[in-house]
Amino acid sequence: MTFITKPKFHHPKLPTNRLGYTRRDYEGAVSTLCAGCGHDSISAAIIQACFELDLAPHRIAKLSGIGCSSKTPTYFLGASHGFNSVHGRMPSVLTGANLANRDLIYLGVSGDGDSASIGLGQFAHSIRRGVDMLYIVENNGVYGLTKGQFSATADKGSLSKRGAANHDEPIDLASMALLLGASFVARSFSGDKEQLVPLIQAAIRHKGAAFIDCISPCVAFNNHPGSTKSFDFVREHNEAVNRLDVMVDHAPIAAQYGPGELVEVTQHDGTVLRLRKLDADYDPRDRGAAISYLQQQAAKGEVVTGLLYVDPESADLHDALSTVATPLNSLDDAALVPGAKALDKVNASLR
Amino acid sequence: MPQSLAGSSLIQSPGGDRTNDFVVKFANVNGSGSASANLLFARSIIRMGVPVVARNIFPSNIQGLPTWYEVRVTEQGWRGARGGVDLMVAMNPQTWDKDVNGVDPGGYLFYDSTKPMPASKFRPDITVLGVPLTAICNRAYTDSRQRQLFKNIIYVGALSALLDIDPAVIEALIAEQFKGKDKLIRPNIDALHMGRDYALQEFPCPLPLKVRAADAVGDAIFVDGNAAAALGAVYGGATVCAWYPITPSSSLAEAFQRHCRRFRGEGEQNKYAIVQAEDELASIGMVIGAGWNGARAFTSTSGPGISLMQEFLGLAYFAEIPAVIFDVQRGGPSTGMPTRTQQSDLLACAYASHGDTKHVLLLPEDPNEAFEMGSLAFDLADRLQTPVFVMLDLDIGMNEWLCRPFAWDDNRRMDRGKVMTREMLEAGIDFGRYLDVDGDGIPYRTYPGTHPTRGSYFTRGTTRDRYARYSEEGPVYIDNMERLLAKFETAKTLVPAPVERAAAEPTGLGIVYFGSTAAAMDEALVTMAERGIHADTLRLRAFPFSDAVADFVRRHDTVFLVEQNRDGQMRTLLVSECDLDPARLVSIRHYDGTPITARFIVGAIAAALPDLNVVPLRKAVP
Ligand SMILES: Cc1ncc(C[n+]2csc(CCOP(=O)(O)OP(=O)(O)O)c2C)c(N)n1
Ligand code: SF4
């Protein structure tokens, strides 16, 4: 397997965004994943989201662990720096990168094996630290790259391609993210671009730990009738709690919707999230309610999608550490090295 | 002091004059607040211009367990522990028998005689000094914590009389210590004098063990290696520290925090980020992420942490990401002896991770070098784009050493290594992340976010070509692996050179050593020379080894390699990396967890000489 670069041919009439980039500028190498893999749809959604948000591709850092899902950063944002770390440990690498330069946008891409098994600890701690990032788990309920073993998100009783039943309880990463204090939690489905693209956009604009659990069927090992992460199963059991529009640099216009139909959430950076509720009782600002709603619907076999929770007053790790606004990686000797005089004082205090 | 206070006793025993040359050992109970009193004792002697060697000995960091603090008073300025005890301050009933037995014949035993011990609990060949510390305290104080803390100051006071330590010096130190909390100064000084007065009244002060003001300390500072290394990290420009608590390295990260608060604040804002990670995997992961993104980052850990970091260290080596790891070595393997010292992580660090890896190790001899190498490590990591280990050990890290003061050249600038800037990319310079442009094996890198269209690349642990494009073709892989070796060759020219010293007389004998062994070695060499054993020495300061190291070994008939581990790890490293004949390298290994002493080195070398049939023979040694 080698790396295939896409020809950089730009049709002169391709639409450009406000920075003058075309959609092609957000693409990466040609995917080597199985044709039809849900992960490719997520890559496409990321490309669209970044293009529409007018982000400069080189200001985005994309980091991942190991797995089919973790390979995907090669397939989008070709002008961005990427980092395939080790299995399950993307969150720590992303955390360190974020500490070094708070001015970039951090996109962490992981799999359910990567995040719910070997990397569960790092997933949890990066969320609870409030690292400013979008953390996407491309959740297919199996290990794709190592050919079909169950992952820790596989539902109890679901069947593998070879017919073996899973006897362990599943880990619901969205519920976990809520418990761990993520300030933005969503779930979506790789086959629902209309829902996924605005969620990615909102998550990128969010300050703090934003988590999206994205069901992404594995066509090779987990898209058969016994699976609860297959394309058909998720389509049939999807219950979307809201529809989301992201308004960047726009004043909110709230009047035209009747009460109970629309929730507007203004984030730190001025983006306005407009949530049209499909479920009348659903308030995405209530963490406790979100957790119990997820549990109730899961008991009914429903896969709840949409923006499950957002805290518009969110803070991030840099706030907690009170770091300077200048990225740490650009501080120079004058800012960092106390010098000989200060050292003499240290010496004097040690005599 | 009124006679009614029970239990003072003085049982005489012989003993010669040991002015400025003796060992006092304090046996305490952990959590009793004795540490600061013991430190006060040591510092007061230093203030009198007399050097000391101070060592903490503590089985575990849990309240109630025994701890010891050893102070070697040495006007000659030896840096290593001596072994043996001349005056035991036995404050822990739990370890009484062991402590009494540890005193050298003719020595002294100091104890709390509130409940006097029967003569059978002592030894006839030592002098017992009983001071009813508890009784004195109970008279003077009602509060139990006060009684506990002042008891320590009272024994310092008594010792000051017995050993002729100038009370004005101690008073000055107390005043400095409680500056800002001035209300505490007077009571401490009072307690000091309670002990002093008692001793002056009850015993013929001073003892033949005594301190006489001298001028042997010079401008030396008294500091522990972890604090020194952390200060080195500040001066090295480290901004990101990710760590996970583990003895004996925790105090390094804590010291970094302290130094940063002092030097790196900007109003309410910090020019640093310190994260206590969830484990060592995360801590090294954060360091790698930060290093990849252009910040100077480090972690501090000990053996078990090194074990956990292996996979990530391989990634940093292969993907060529700067990272600094302070490894404060303790007794291994496994949980081993968490509070004892060893040099047993050498191989685990030099070859950390699976596959063919090699890492740079720096080997400081004391806190001063821990500072220097602590700052240098960041330049090396950036220049070489690779992990750099600073190999401390518990002895250096957690003990206060009297050492050369820290020095800094204000003209020195951080060497960020080969970083391709926006301007260079703009100028059209060809960027291949793994291109060996200069023939030194070191490629250029870019920081993420540098340029809109040029210089981005993908970092991965899988193999790739010179332009960072994934490829598992054999020749491409070999090309990369060979370049990494070339880079390691370059490292030889960048790391600190070894220090060679020639013996006073021509000799076929060589000694190689490194790290905390240096302290004992200086003294051992003098002792050996007095007995007619002369040896040239080479102190290793880094891995990879410069050519001078192999040269030194080849120039000598026999080379002793002194190290503090069971398996002769440094010997293995030398033999395999320098392609040396193992027979030429004789291992001297000290690994019981205590700091190596000159006595041990001299004994081991003298014992090995007759077997080796090299001159001088054993008869030179008593
Ligand atoms: C330390 C370690 N253990 C095991 C592996 C093998 N491995 C590679 S990918 C993978 C599972 C990936 O599953 P997931 O994260 O769900 O991604 P998917 O391929 O399904 O997208 C495993 C176990 C590894 N690379 N490293
Ligand atoms: S194995 Fe599954 S997860 Fe991996 S690329 Fe194929 S379909 Fe996607």
Image (cartoon, grey):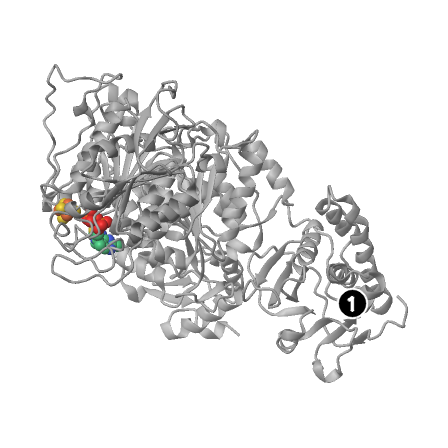
Seen at 20% across and 49% down, the residue is: A229
Q: Which of the image's four quarters has the N terminus of chain B?
A: bottom right
Quadrant housing residue B295: top left
Seen at 16% across and 24% down, the residue is: A24
Residue indicated by mark 1: B133
Where residue A93 sits: x, y (%)?
A: 34, 42
Quadrant housing residue B218: top right
- Judging depth in this view, the residue of B450 and A309 nearest the camera is A309
Circle 1 residues within 10 Å: few <14, some 14–19, many ≥20: many
Q: Amino acid at mark 1?
A: Leu
Where residue B325 sits: x, y (%)?
A: 40, 48
Question: In the rendered view, does B303 fall on the left or right side of B435?
Answer: right
Q: Is residue B449 above or below residue A156?
A: above
Identify the element where label 1 is drawn. helix
- Judging depth in this view, the residue of B273 and A347 nearest the camera is B273
Protein chain holding label 1 = B
Q: Is residue B497 visible?
A: no
Q: Is residue A24 above or below residue B32?
A: above
Q: Is residue B141 visible?
A: yes
